[in-house]
Amino acid sequence: MGWLQSLFSPLKKLWFRKHSTTHKKTEDINILHEDVKSCQYEDVHVLWSILVDSQTPPLTSKR
């Protein structure tokens, strides 16, 4: 049975790593966004908007 565990152990680790990081990043961003919305300082809101705008792909102009 040891060989069976050694066969599935790396696959199991990869599966958990892939699925946990995707959801964790999304949850972290949502928590951060809620914190930013509740903040009273306008500077924080400006910095958040800069961060969000930098994450969107730039518009390409057609010539």
Image (tube, rainbow, N blue to C red):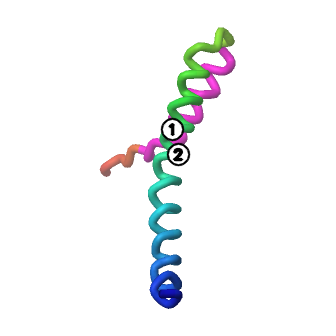
Q: Is residue 63 left or right of residue 19?
A: left
Left or right relative to 60: residue 22: right
- Residue 47: image location, x then y, percent: 64, 27
Q: Residues within 10 Å of mark 2 (few under 14, many from 20)?
A: few
Q: Residue at x 68, y 12 (%)?
A: 41
Q: Amino acid at mark 2?
A: Lys
Q: Which mark is residue 24?
A: 2
Query: Magenta segment: does it hold 49?
Result: yes
Q: Nearer the viewer, residue 51 or 31?
A: 31
Residue 28 image position (x, y, % from top left): 56, 38
Question: Which residue position holds label 1?
Answer: 27
- Where residue 39 is drawn, which disc sits there? none
Query: In the image, what residue type sits under mark 1?
Result: Glu
Residue found 36% across the figure and 47% down from its top: 61
Q: Are marks 2 and 1 in contact (CB under 8 Å)?
A: yes
Q: Residues within 10 Å of mark 1 (few under 14, many from 20)?
A: few
The x, y position of residue 23, in whole percent, is: 47, 47
Q: Is residue 44 within the magenta segment?
A: yes
In three-dimensional space, the C-alpha distance between marks 2 and 1, rounded to whole angstroms, equals 5 Å
Q: Position of residue 57 (x, y in %)?
A: 43, 46
